[in-house]
Amino acid sequence: MPGIFTKANPASNIERKVLKLKTALIACKTIEDEVNQALEKAGIAYPVYWIESGLHNYPDKLKDTLQQCIDSITDCDYIVMIFGLCGNALLGLQSDHATLIIPRVDDCISLFLGGNSHRRKMEDSTRAYYLTRGWLRYENNIWKEYQRSIEKYGAERTRSIFRVMLKHYTHLVVIDTGAYDTSSFIEEVTEIAGALGLTLKVVPAELNLLTRALGSDWSEEFAIIEPGQKITLQDMGSCNNYLGREGTYNAS
């Protein structure tokens, strides 16, 4: 149900690193595969609080749930939030006890593509709708919208509707994060691309920001919010929030 967050305790098969200060993670279930893989590779056993992915469709509810989750974490020095701005849902959040660490990215797409600047360079030449297995599994994505439209309006009218919706798009881009074999769902995304009239493309992810977030390498590409301070747009630096921009799509 919307509004619920769950805590995952550190896996017993991951070697815990002895850290001077305690850290917890808050992350979206949509990127569970990638976060768990990064934790395992780093040999880090932070507790993770998972936020239900469907809340991205309701920024106010997402914000309330994130604040409740932050407030529930009272025994950590740092809380690393594996989120982007997400429809500005992060603005105004604060912790009374811990320092918040947030990558300065628009959304999880930018997080998986090496940051905002790298993503924008890609979109100079490719107007794309982005997918990972997590977005297909959890999110209210464009394919689910397409299927619902067919049920409501029929196939012919649906094709006309989506031709208009996607007139600025050229590609359906699968981000290969390395957390699973993309061949397990490539048949499905090939069907999606064909139905939407988009060219299918698979690109490798650049997960440097995610790795650094977990490893405490917090440079200027991360917002560091001290206890008692609220997250502001200025804190998020160069974030430009892609929601609503022509020719781009925010799937997270």
Image (cartoon, rainbow, N blue to C red):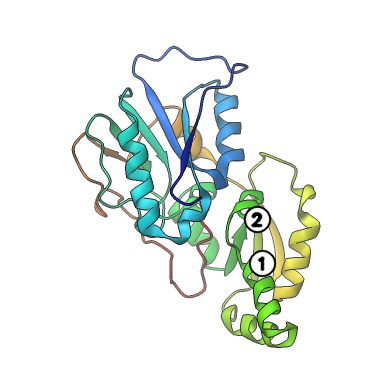
Identify the secondary structure beneath mark 1: helix
Q: Quadrant of residue 80?
A: top left
Identify the secondary structure beneath mark 2: helix
In the rendered view, tell whether residue 169 sits above or below residue 26.
Answer: below
Percent across and percent down for residue 55 are 46, 54
Amino acid carrying label 2: it is: Leu
In the rendered view, tell whether residue 84 sits above or below residue 101.
Answer: below
Query: Mark 2 or mark 1, which has the lower sequence index?
Result: 2
Instruction: Return the mark for residue 136.
Output: 2
Percent across and percent down for residue 38 are 56, 32
Percent across and percent down for residue 120 are 48, 61
Identify the residue at horizontal 43%, vertical 46% (top origin).
Answer: 83
Amino acid carrying label 1: it is: Trp
In the rendered view, tell whether residue 153 sits above or below residue 236.
Answer: below
| For the residues bearing labels 2 and 1, Cβ distance under 8 angstroms | yes
Q: Quadrant of residue 19?
A: top left
Q: Nearest the camera: 176 or 142?
A: 142
Q: Nearest the camera: 50 or 85?
A: 50
Left or right: 196, with 126 as reference point:
right
Which residue is disc 1 drawn over?
Answer: 143
Mark 1, residues whose alpha carbon is within 10 Å: few (<14), some, or many (≥20)? some
